[in-house]
Image (cartoon, rainbow, N blue to C red):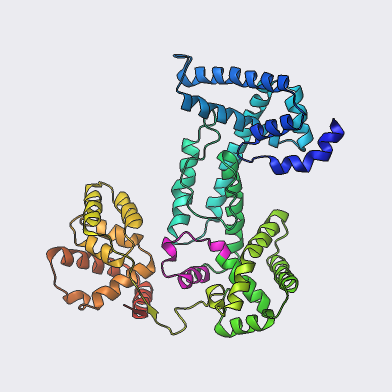
Amino acid sequence: MDNFITNKRYDFENLLSKKHYFRSLMEVLHSNNLLNIREVESIQLQLLDILTEMVGYYTRNKSSSVRVEVANQIMLSICYTIGLFLKSQSTIEESITLIKNKEVKYLFYHGGKVLKAKVDECKRLFLVVKETRLQTENYAYIDTISYGIPLFFKEYDVRFASHETPGSIDYPLAIDEMNLVGIEYIEDYLNKIILENKFCSHFDGSEIKVLLKEFNKDSNHMLINIFQLAVTNYLGCTLIGKDSRSLEIIKGDRTYLKSIMKDLSQVEFRRLILGATEKICKELFIKDKNFTEYINNTVLKITPEIKRCIETNTLEKIFITLGKSEENILKYEDGKSLDDSRFRNITEEIRDCSRVEDKIKIIREEFHSLKDLIDAFSSDCIFDDEFIDIFKALDDFEVALLIKSISNNKALDNYYGTESEKEWHEKFNKYLESLDDTKKVELITISQGISM
């Protein structure tokens, strides 16, 4: 039998589910006659014994039964926990030996120990994420680290729902393992975002900030991966032969890139890209195998898009020029405004909030146009110094848009509208006056480069 298992090892691995590892392994073993029906029934009975015990814990021994849906969820949790222990073995042969020779309760007990160790490790990894976090204004990135991941640790139920992934993980990775769930998904996510943060730390934060703005003026509101944008532009710089750790690519660079890549065969193109990727890792002194592999996989992911952009003469979409714009003027197009009914409901919700932090969260999530934001300022749902806190929560471009919108009407000090309009203008003036002169000039300069 051992020889048969060894010969079938890779077939097994291809058939196993990452989400339902234990159950899929059982099915594969039975279908290949490595577990007979009597052994399968024995395992099922042992699982039911564990379920009965867990239901007792769930109801605090007040009842021996629960709804079918709850029982199914607890059973999924039991199987997930057992799967963690089996996955932790060095080989699939060891996992099979355990299933055949050990009681299911033994597997469940040791799976619980693996689970607890993973939770502790993920808490440690999260500290590293916070230590290496990027200084960015991308809301998905900020919310995921500040709220989403902590919410996972707060709500994760290791006993009755170890297979669930609570929390709000909105920020996309360059390569996201969507086949994982529970603590395994969080562990994979944290390890990868640490790698992404460390890569981006090699570059000037202001360059990355501009890179995002030039990718899309609404990049702060988009579900985009910052690392992928950075690695793409640095790949372009490396292909050109630039020595400095800059992400800057100009129009002439793109012309050169097209000239050296447009006639390459698929094999030659791939060899050129992977050679540049290897050079990137050497230049940044990246030697960790997982790190280099992650960079390689990300580059391979974007390679078809590079090829397509060469063919369609649109390399500017993937290798981005830093700076305000090619013409030095940014034409701003406002986002879609909410209909009147929806707008009223949101402003009433804002008005009912007692904490300015909650008002800021609603504004961030619900308003995607400058018009809606300005209308909200004049809707008697924000009061006194709440305006100042909200202005502080805006990014530089949004503040510049407010400056531009007011200056397009009349000078800041002389504009007279409704009482609500006058109030937020006065608070906005107060906020601008609180800034140092350098910052104020920077914001005004940005506003002057916007065409509305």
220 and 160: which is toward the camera: 160
Q: How many marks?
A: 0
Q: Residue furthest right?
A: 3
Q: Is residue 161 left or right of residue 4?
A: left
Image location (x, y in percent) of residue 358? 31, 49
Q: Residue at x 73, y 22 (%)?
A: 102
Q: Quadrant of the C terminus?
A: bottom left
447 and 21: which is toward the camera: 21
Q: Is residue 389 above or below residue 153?
A: below
* Residue 104 can be seen, yes or no: yes
Residue 4: quadrant of the picture: top right
Q: Quadrant of the N terminus?
A: top right
Q: Main secondary structure of the magenta part?
A: helix
Q: Residue at x 60, y 73 (%)?
A: 308
Q: Is residue 82 above or below residue 293?
A: above
Q: Is residue 299 above or below residue 403?
A: above
* Residue 245 can be seen, yes or no: no
406 and 308: which is toward the camera: 308
Query: Magenta segment: does it hold 122?
Result: no
Image location (x, y in percent) of residue 415? 17, 74
**Span highlighted in magenta in the image:** 207-228
Q: Is residue 367 left or right of residue 255?
A: left
Residue 316: quadrant of the picture: bottom right
Image location (x, y in percent) of residue 305? 59, 69
Image location (x, y in percent) of residue 393? 35, 59
